[in-house]
Image (spheres, rainbow, N blue to C red):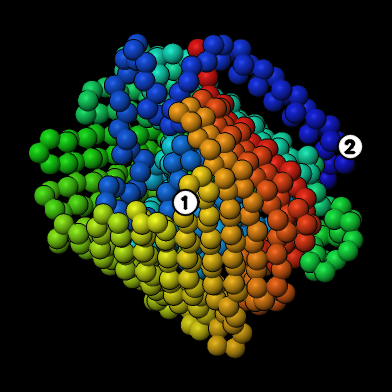
Amino acid sequence: MRSTSNRRIAHQAGLLAWCFCLCLCTVLGGEQNALPADTAIIRHANDTLLAAKRWAGRLTANGDFPLAAVGKENIRTIGYSQLGDLLIEATPFTPLSQGALGQWDGVDLLGILPEDQIASHNGVPIYSASSIGYHPLLYAPVAAERVEMLAGSDAIGTLPGLGFAGMNVQRAMYNTARPFTSMWYHQGAGDLVGGHVTFAQNVTRHSSIAANIRRTGARGAYQQTDFDAWNVHLQGRMIASSATEWLLSYDVSTIDVDPWSGLAKDPYGSVDVIETLEPRTRTTRESMRRHDVSLTHAFAHDSDSLLHIATTAYASTDALRRADTLFDGWYGGVMTQVAARINSIHLQGGARVQYTNPDTSYTQLVSGAPSAHSWAKATFGVTPGLNVSSSLRYDGGQSGGVGYGIAAVLQDSMLRVKLDASWIDPGPTATSRGLYFAHALLRGSPVDIQAIAYYRNVNAPQKSYGAIVSAGTTMGNLRIDALARGIGRGDSVTSALTLYANVSVAYKYATASSTVEIGTVIGFIGDGLLPQFDVTRRSFSTLPLVATTMQHNGVSFFSHIVVGSASLRASFENVLGSRWYSVAYMPEIPRQFRLSVDWTFVD
């Protein structure tokens, strides 16, 4: 394990590297022009590239009702440090923040914990063949066009894996003949510093290139919580005609981190200085390296009917080093996704063949012959305001199974309601399990309301259930938002309902090109039982659960300023230093100042 002095030297070296990158951004930026927030629609008189296929890489279509979707125009206005942090800030789902930096943060999706969630980019599966799970630090949100959160029948019928919930990241799209440069910077407590530089340009009338480079690192506020991570994303896009295009992408990610499993004693009742609190377990420093490459051909026919076909060849390799032990693995395959609309019927489906060569000494994956996978979803427009859909999935291999689901969506100009039921049968030796939920969204009235209620049964008698309700209203320049969650976990012997709530009040002033917003937020967690993170297994254990006491996260203040193409967000969080934690024994950092800057340039 490296010494503290070596880690500080590495951290300072990273800071110097990003100072150079940010200076380079400024030089490339030159005389910047005001741009809209969504860089995908940047247009100039001399732009000549044919428009990219907006549907390519998305799993949801117009009229679908996903759990949540975060576009890049929203991403740039949120103060976050990594993908897990973004999901906590941008969605209403239950946070699973470990309180430290560079860890496996995420959200609970209707009772589905992160290790059971399916992850993909442009529909291509992403997971670790050498470890367990997928570290959120491995993907840079700034390189995303859109992040989709799916559950139930949508997950069964569109995601590239057998699971009740998950996330798909659509690759960013650019279209500008002039050199496009964008930078993102973030800082926080524990010497947390992050930076991201994006460069893109149309090369010819039919092609464009883009490069994203990101670095994040921190010394850490608690013992054994420093980390260093780099992300590089390269892509080339060629649009052969109005009907076809090619996309080649390559990602490389590196992470050096001290895996953190929380504190040895209850931090809420502790009066010790946070820097001296002992970790619950001492772990060996880890180094992770990952490479992802994919080549996609997209074809579209949009005349009297709709037909979209995307075929992708992909391969991924990753390695995990602990002390002198190396775990590595890889997987690769070919996948085809099809979407067709004929009158009031919308069909989606896909199939893939994949070979996986995991490091079986560490993971639970099984290597061997290629495995086959297929999935389909059919949506029928029964009436102008009622859609009914059905999904079916088959996953081959020893860890495969069958999934199926049904859903109905009722909608008008103000109200959308979705009822969804799905089931997974993992095989003859396991018990079938199901997820049932209702999702309602009311917009256009004085108060915008969103509500989700769900019940999930796993291998009996375990279960999880809950409700999420958010409401917001605007009164002149004043915006008020409230969010409440009731989350139940356990079995017939040990179970409890934990309540989460927070309220935000903000004043917003806007002109044609600038916006200033200032506000405050306070949150609560009631008595209950919370899952605990096991860093060795990369999982949040639900049994046995850990009891908590009622707590609040102090008061946080935030400001958001947008001037032309520049966005700045600053926040002073957990002002009262109450050491709120949303995963047992993993406290949020008290009295933390965070700053995020997003700035776009066009020369």
Q: Taking 102 as reference, is 564 left or right?
A: left
> Which quadrant holds residue 568?
top right
Look at the image and tell me whether residue 405 can be seen. no
Image position, residue 36 (x, y; %): 43, 27
Q: Residue at x 75, y 65 (%)?
A: 585
Mark toward the viewer: 2 or 1:
1
Image position, residue 598 (x, y; %): 58, 31
Instruction: Name the residue carrying label 2.
Output: 5
Look at the image and tell me whether residue 484 can be seen. yes
Instruction: Name the residue carrying label 1.
Output: 474
In the image, is residue 280 above or below residue 76?
below
Work out whether residue 290 or residue 525 is closer to the camera in this orientation and state it: 525
Q: Secondary structure at mark 1?
A: strand
Image position, residue 53 (x, y; %): 30, 32
Image position, residue 478 (x, y; %): 53, 48
In the picture as drawn, the residue positioned furthest to the front comes out as: 476
What whole-number distance in Å separates the C-alpha atoms at marks 2 and 1?
51 Å
